[in-house]
Image (tube, grey):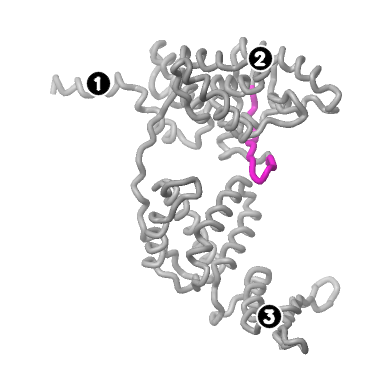
Amino acid sequence: MTITKNKNGTWRVDISDGINPLTGIQGRHRKYDCKTKKEAVEYEAKYRLEELGEFKRKDKLSIDSLYALLKKEDVLRGNRQSTKDTQDSYYRIYVSKFFQNADMRLVKTSDIKAFRDWLVKTPSIKGGNLSASNINTIMIFVGKLFDISIMNDLRKDNPCRALKRLPQQHKEMFYYTPEQFKQFISLFDESEYHFQLLYKILMFTGARIGEALALTWEQINLEIGYIDIKSSAHYRRSKVTIAETKTTQSIRRIYIHKALIDELSKWKQRQFQLLIEYISTPEQLQIYQNTPKVLTAPDVSNFKKEKLKKRAELINLKLIRNHDFRHSHAAFLISQGLRKGEGKDYLFFTLMKRLGHSSITTTINTYSHLFPTQQKEIANAFDDF
């Protein structure tokens, strides 16, 4: 029998794992210390589902088991660590709490709607309520859980598909003009050059913050003048993970102007002199390091909050998000292209490649509002209707 009672009153689970085809030995998995028979039964069902892929129709499909199957699939697909960490937060803070006693085989669309309604009322851990954007993202994650259940023949339907996304407020885009960026750069003192260099990279390349923080000298060609974006840095639980870029289209080569090439060349020599006693492979240094410790996203956020905010207020300069330097890069290139009379299609295609967007539709949807003259021309065309 798989489940038996021990002499001390606890329960033991003894599960056959099949015959090993190489050794011919019967595989077994045992757990000796279940406090109740119910706990032992649930453990057996969980182990058979998650480890052996077996599921009996009478068994309860717990949210824990469903998430375990999703995590296995994430490993097989090679999903980014940042994606897995985000899912883990959603699961731990919201999903597992609401569905902790549910049988996920029996959950209906009305139950999923009840979960979404609960999210609307649930406070965010950062304060205030969850935004529509956050709720929609959590719902996408829950939809993935049910897709996994279908893939493992545990359900035939996904109850999330009948629900539409909550309407999201359009986020206003902020960006710096060249004059404003020069003001911003003037806020740094000499000892903060590594932070200043990071923001120059963001402004002059349009790289995402994670992509910029993953840069080492191995990705920079100072002779020809380009930066290869191949990976992204992700910080979680006091650890930096260098992983894949956001999408395969994000892997790209960004050419840089001569002034930045010269600045990087000078800094590279200076950095090697500063850190020579700590390094054996200087090309693997993160390009912003001025100590043996790499620069991380929390370092940047803390510096911005503790130092830059006060300094910017003194010169009446509004601070923008780190991601808005990417928008500043795009806005400047669009203004230059319009000034030179370049076609709109050419500008969008160039931006798509430089920014690493997955499609030109993303580029158009993000930056088409920066072409106000075209909108006026369309309206004026009706004068001759």
Q: Does 311 appear in magenta?
A: no
The three-letter amino acid code for the residue at tag 1 is Lys
Callout 1: 10 Å neighbours few (<14), some, many (20+)?
Answer: few
Q: Secondary structure at mark 1?
A: helix
**Alpha carbon of mark 1 to alpha carbon of mark 2: how far?**
46 Å
The three-letter amino acid code for the residue at tag 2 is Glu
The residue where tag 3 is placed is 35
What segment is highlighted magenta in the picture?
A: 227-241
Whether residue 31 sits left or right of residue 249 in the image: it is right
Q: Secondary structure at mark 2?
A: helix
Residue 151 location (% of width, % of height): 54, 64
Residue 209 location (% of width, % of height): 58, 31
Q: Quadrant of the C terminus?
A: top left
Q: Nearer the viewer, mark 1 or mark 2?
A: 2
Callout 3: 10 Å neighbours few (<14), some, many (20+)?
Answer: few
Vertical placement of residue 299 versus 96, above or below: above
Residues tagged 3 and 1 counted as in contact (Cβ below 8 A): no
